[in-house]
Amino acid sequence: MNCRRSPYIRAALAALAACLAWPGALAGGGAEQQREGGAAALPVRGLHTFPPAKKDLAGALEFIRQALAAEGANTLIMEFNYAYNYRSRPEFADASALGRDEVRQIADACREKGIALVPQINCLGHQSWGQRNGRLLQAHPEFDETPGKYPQNKGIYCRSYCPLHPEVHKVLFDLIDELAAACDAKAFHVGMDEVFILADADCPRCKGKGAAEVFAGEVRTLHQHLKERGLRMWMWGDRFIDGKATGIGQWEAAVNGTHPAVDQAPTDIVICDWHYGKAHDTAVFFAGKGFEVVSCPWRNGDVALAQLGRIRAIRAGADKAAAGRALGMVQTTWGGLAPFAAAYRAQAAGAAPTKDSASEAANCFRVLSKAWRDGQ
Ligand SMILES: [Zn+2]
């Protein structure tokens, strides 16, 4: 499968690339033109990226104010995870990452242009990458769902935290609340994609429980907290899709028993339905279940246009309730904002796309945004 593992490998490479020089301020390329066209027809026209490095902040602000606005985008999901200088929990302080004042500048730029800034912290899964554990498990190894198992993370995709650990949400909620406040957010993305380690037989709290039960429980716990804070919950949709029945498989859908959780989750969650190799009839599945849904392409413009066509078909369909739930599209980039913006600028100036993630995502975004502006 073309997406297997590659998004996060690409992400790591892109994060590295984000440490390299940003070529400078945005200029020209039609960015000054406000072309709304048929854009208003889709309630969500979004982009998902990792945050810029400190040195790339000025360029990122300019990209938001010029290019994103000109492309008709109205949503920016920024996956911070632990790349933020947290103050509420000293063990997550990182002076090299963006802090409150810098993130406020991003929030201000977004607000000026009518773009909703949706911060993200990956919850449940994706707590390690390769041999390296993520910051949550580095600081709190006691939250590991499988402590002592899989030395050097060999033989697994990513670690998970134990959602039934009595302390884990106290920590997570402090971080979520702090990041949401810095972003002046009205919505928060909790990730929850590609969770493979769940309800482990050796976890004293989770053993014997079903994967769907545990997954749905964590969805409800996160949802309840966000709701109390007035934040709309967004999450990836793959664990809710039956990978066997649909034939979509174990990455963009689930074959590890989590999919029945779709009927145990609050429906006022916005589902980010990511599929990269082919457009599937999954947006209509989520809309039919009562969820608002956005379709998420990555590096293939034809897939993006096919997904957009399905979203528009739902919106124009006979099922009026479902029609209102097909919110739109979110372009994923699996990289930092700076390399994506650089690729976007190069293509806007006439350069052909190249075979790297940032360039392909930028090309896909330009194809998609033209279509959403033109009302295609
Ligand atoms: Zn557990």
Image (cartoon, grey):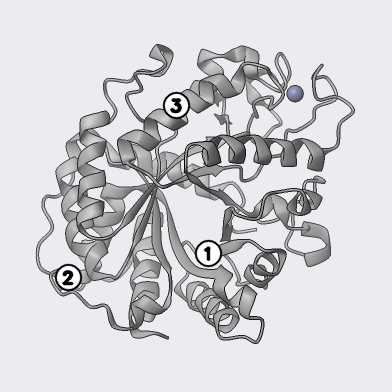
Amino acid type at circle 2 is Ala
Q: Residues within 10 Å of mark 2 (few under 14, many from 20)?
A: few
Q: Is residue 20 visible?
A: no
The residues tagged by marks 3 and 2 sit, at their Cα atoms, a distance apart of: 40 Å
Instruction: Please state which of residues 304 and 34 is positioned toward the viewer in this rendering.
Output: 34
Q: Mark 3 highlights which residue?
A: 175
- Residue 122, placed above or below residue 257: above
The residues tagged by marks 1 and 2 sit, at their Cα atoms, a distance apart of: 29 Å
Lower sequence index among marks 1 and 3: 3
Q: Residues within 10 Å of mark 1 (few under 14, many from 20)?
A: many
Place of residue 106 in the rendered image (x, y in percent of width and height, measured from the top left): 24, 44
Q: Mark 2 highlights which residue?
A: 349
Picture residue at 51% right of the left edge, 27% below the top: 173
Place of residue 182 in the rendered image (x, y in percent of width and height, measured from the top left): 31, 34
The residues tagged by marks 1 and 3 sit, at their Cα atoms, a distance apart of: 26 Å
Residue 32: mark: none
Amino acid type at circle 3 is Leu
Q: Mark 1 highlights which residue?
A: 294
Place of residue 144 in the rendered image (x, y in percent of width and height, measured from the top left): 66, 20
